[in-house]
Image (cartoon, helix red, strand yellow):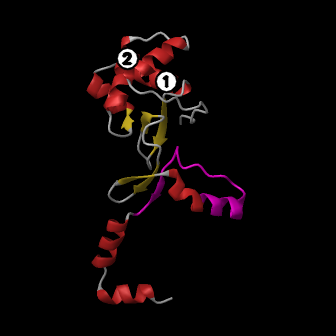
C-alpha cells in the first residue's frame, strides 16, 4: 500500500504553470510526465493509474513511477475508495474528502469543513485527529438504505424500529 505524501500541495493555474514549476525544482519533463500532467488536468475527478495507462497509452510501470514522483512534489495526491485501486487527483483541485457507498459504488465528495464536527468528536472521544483525505468514509448511501428498507416486508420494518 502506498503511503500518502506529506508534501505541501502545489497550486497551478494550468499545465504549463505546473511544468514550469516542476522544471524549476530540478525535474526533467519527459513525454510520460507531460502526458500524465495533461491527463490529470483533463480528468473531472480522481482517476486510477490503470485508466491513465489505458487512455494515454503509456507503460504501466512508468505511469506508477511518475505518479509517485509527482505526488512527492505536491502536484497530485492519491486516495482510496473502499477496496478499489488508488486514485489520483491534482492536489489543489477538488479539495474534498469522500464518502463511498459499498452497495452502489456512489462517490460523494464532501468539503472538509462539513466533516469537521465528526473530526472534533473523534478528537474528543479518542484523542486522534482523523484525516479523511487518503481513505474514503465507507458506508451505505441514503438511496441504498431507503431501497433496503423498502424491500423488507412490512412486519420486518416495524419490528426493526422497536428497540
Judged left or right of residue 5, residue 41 is left
Residue 93 picture quarter: top left
Q: Is residue 62 visible?
A: no
Label 1 Cα crowd, 10 Å radius (few <14 / some 14-19 / many 20+): many
Residue 8 shown in magenta: no
Q: How many marks?
A: 2
Residue 120 shown in magenta: yes
In the foreground, 78 or 156: 78
From this viewpoint, which residue is outermost toward the right?
127
Judged left or right of residue 39, residue 12 is right
Per the model, the C-alpha gap separating discs 1 and 2 is 11 Å
What secondary structure is marked by label 1?
helix
Residue 105 picture quarter: bottom left
* Numbered circle sitting on residue 34: 2
In the foreground, 74 or 54: 74
Q: Is residue 69 visible?
A: yes
Q: Where does the image place residue 75, in percent across and percent down from the top left?
A: 49, 27
Q: Residue at x 68, y 58 (%)?
A: 123
Q: Residue at x 30, y 88 (%)?
A: 154
Q: Where does the image place residue 60, in percent across and percent down from the top left?
A: 37, 23
From this viewpoint, which residue is outermost toward the front?
13
Q: Residue at x 34, y 54 (%)?
A: 106
Q: Going from the N terminus, do you reach mark 1 or mark 2 first?
A: 2
Q: Is residue 71 above or below residue 32?
A: below
* Numbered circle sitting on residue 70: 1
Mark 1 in CB contact with mark 2 (< 8 angstroms): no
In the foreground, 93 or 58: 93
Label 2 Cα crowd, 10 Å radius (few <14 / some 14-19 / many 20+): some
Q: Where does the image place residue 83, in percent across and percent down from the top left?
A: 44, 47
Please report the bounds of the magenta region as a residue range.
119-140
Amino acid at each position: 500500500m502506498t503511503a500518502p505524501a506529506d508534501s505541501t500541495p502545489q497550486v497551478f493555474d494550468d499545465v504549463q504553470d505546473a511544468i514550469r514549476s516542476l522544471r524549476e525544482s530540478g525535474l526533467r519533463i519527459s513525454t510520460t510526465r507531460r502526458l500524465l500532467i495533461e491527463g490529470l488536468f483533463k480528468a473531472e475527478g480522481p482517476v486510477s493509474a490503470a485508466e491513465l495507462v489505458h487512455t494515454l497509452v503509456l507503460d504501466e510501470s512508468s505511469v506508477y513511477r511518475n505518479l509517485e514522483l509527482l505526488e512527492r512534489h505536491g502536484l497530485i495526491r492519491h486516495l482510496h475508495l473502499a477496496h478499489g485501486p488508488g486514485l489520483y487527483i491534482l492536489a489543489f483541485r477538488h479539495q474534498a474528502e469522500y464518502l463511498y457507498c459499498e452497495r452502489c459504488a456512489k462517490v460523494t465528495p464532501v468539503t472538509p469543513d462539513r466533516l469537521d464536527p465528526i473530526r472534533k468528536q473523534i478528537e474528543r472521544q479518542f484523542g486522534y485527529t482523523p484525516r479523511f483525505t487518503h481513505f474514503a468514509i465507507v458506508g451505505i448511501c441514503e438511496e441504498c438504505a431507503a431501497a433496503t428498507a423498502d424491500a423488507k416486508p412490512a412486519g420486518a420494518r416495524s419490528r426493526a424500529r422497536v428497540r
